[in-house]
Amino acid sequence: MRDEFWDTVPHYGGQKEIWDALRAAADSDLALAQTIVDSAGIIVSNSDMKICYDERGAKYELPKYVLSEPTNLIRDG
């Protein structure tokens, strides 16, 4: 589901560079994610990054499943 979301984000509008930064931040640890968000000029409206804005005011909504690891799945290996 994560890959499908990131593959379809161009259809949601906004800038590709911001979507790329949001993806990198979502896949990073907290310190690196903060650095990525700050350097891209992304405004995070709440603590979990579900709703963000770029400097031009475009809204970026991220579903919860791209922001955290699933807790109800069994790991292989």
Image: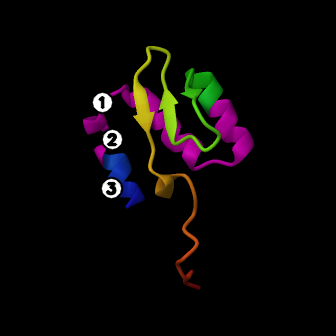
Percent across and percent down for residue 60 are 42, 33
- Quarter of the image with the N terminus is bottom left
Q: Is residue 26 magenta?
A: yes
Residue at figure coordinates x 56%, y 46% from the top left: 26
Percent across and percent down for residue 70 are 54, 68
Q: Residue furthest right?
A: 31
Pointer 1 local density, CA inside 10 Å: few below 14, some 14–19, many at least 20: few
Q: CA distance from mark 1 to mark 2?
A: 7 Å
Residue 9 tag number = 2
- Numbered range of the magenta stretch: 8-36
Q: Is residue 55 above or below residue 62?
A: above
Residue at figure coordinates x 38%, y 47% from the top left: 6
Q: Which residue is mark 1?
A: 13
Q: CA distance from mark 1 to mark 3?
A: 16 Å
Whether residues under marks 1 and 3 lie with C-beta atoms below 8 angstroms apart, the answer is no
Q: Is residue 72 magenta?
A: no
Task: Name the main secondary structure of what is drawn in magenta.
Answer: helix
- Quarter of the image with the C terminus is bottom right
Q: Which residue is mark 3?
A: 4
* Foreground of the two, 75 or 62: 62
